[in-house]
Image (cartoon, rainbow, N blue to C red):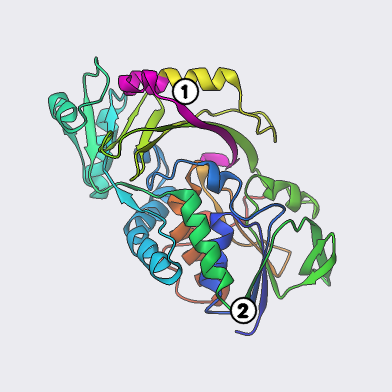
Amino acid sequence: MSKQVVVVGGGVIGLLTAFNLAAKVGQVVVCDQGEVGRESSWAGGGIVSPLYPWRYSPAVTALAHWSQDFYPQLGERLFASTGVDPEVHTTGLYWLDLDDEAEALAWAEREQRPLSAVDISAAYDAVPVLGPGFKRAIYMAGVANVRNPRLVKSLKAALLAMPNVTLREHCQITGFVQQGGRVTGVHTADGVLVADEVVLSAGAWSGDLLRTLGLELPVEPVKGQMILFKCDEDFLPSMVLAKGRYAIPRRDGHILVGSTLEHAGYDKTPTGEALESLKASAVELLPELEGATVVAHWAGLRPGSPEGIPYIGPVPGHEGLWLNCGHYRNGLVLAPASCQLFTDLLTGAEPIIDPAPYAPAGRLG
């Protein structure tokens, strides 16, 4: 395939889409309005699982399972080719005092996932720094987290090394070029960028761009705030989650605690109110963080979508335009499967999973 493909949006979804397409098409150009990977891909926690996987539809589950199984080899491949380790860190995950524990266990049995109830004393033995008062725990072995800023850095390095890939940062896309009912490129501040196929992977901004074609994509920005502590490397041996908040250990002792869920438009300003709320959650989960220094506090914008089901596939009535966007809280979780499925669809290969649930057809206004 000697096509030129333009990918609009340089988050993990856009970068991994380009990474997969590079071996299949002639040229790939990735355009981002800022620096690649500096929006929700950089801001998230990087747990390679939906926070509550049993609460999602089979469409999300199918992508999540494929991605979870694929992440270790993706991390190894990127590390080997770039020298930048995305740090796919397998720690397992404890959920504490769930209201819907029975549903979680039934889902795990049905989906054959390694999640089971454990005695609360076993959870305290495994995670000695856990706060007091928790009564019940379930545990899923094999759950990893990826250090998302390093994943972005690794993907960027891999793409820069590919002779048929161009990264255009600080490249604002203002609309699409159309000829005879087909999308043939994009409008940039520097003029028209011609393409055989255009892929919209612009995260929370995807809906704004599609609106220039008179299409309504129900993707909106949903703000999330996080805080980061620095502890000893062996301080937290496993991820823990309670009352909607989680703590994630990195290999070097950094602990991420998140996150808020706010509908505040495109405002990414970190707030004092969220900082205090996150600190309180952190200390409830891990009391030893009471005196720890918050080394960073930030906010990002998730691409909110109905039921968190992404849009993957061609846009009806606009030949040459494709979507790979709307992953809501699970962009990092679902990225490997979403981008492989997308590549299969664009190149005409046998899709890795049934693409029907993600098709834009019938889901756009």
Residue 278 disc label: 1
Q: Residue at x 77, y 55 (%)?
A: 172
**How many circles with numbers are drawn on the protein?**
2
- Report x, y in % for residue 252: 35, 44
Q: In the current view of this chain or complex, which residue is farthest to the bottom?
A: 2
Say what secondary structure mark 2 lies in.
loop
Q: Residue at x 36, y 41 (%)?
A: 53
Q: Magenta segment: does it hold 283?
A: yes
Q: Nearer the viewer, residue 218 or 7?
A: 7
| Residue 252 visible in the shown view | yes
| Residue 327 visible in the shown view | no
Q: Identify the amino acid type marked 1.
A: Leu
Residues packed near mark 2 inside 10 Å, few (<14), some (14 to 19) or many (20 plus):
some
In 3D space, how far apart are the residues under numbered discs 2 and 1 (Cα atoms)? 44 Å
Q: Residue at x 44, y 25 (%)?
A: 293
Q: Magenta segment: does it hold 209?
A: no
Q: Nearer the viewer, residue 103 or 226?
A: 226
109 horizontally vs 22: left or right = left
**Stretch in magenta:** 281-307
The image quarter in which residue 116 lies: top left
Q: Residue at x 39, y 52 (%)?
A: 64
Say what secondary structure mark 1 lies in.
helix
Q: Identify the amino acid type marked 2.
A: Asn
Residues packed near mark 1 inside 10 Å, few (<14), some (14 to 19) or many (20 plus):
many
- Report x, y in % for residue 50: 40, 42
Q: In the current view of this chain or complex, which residue is farthest to the top?
A: 133
The residue where tag 2 is placed is 164
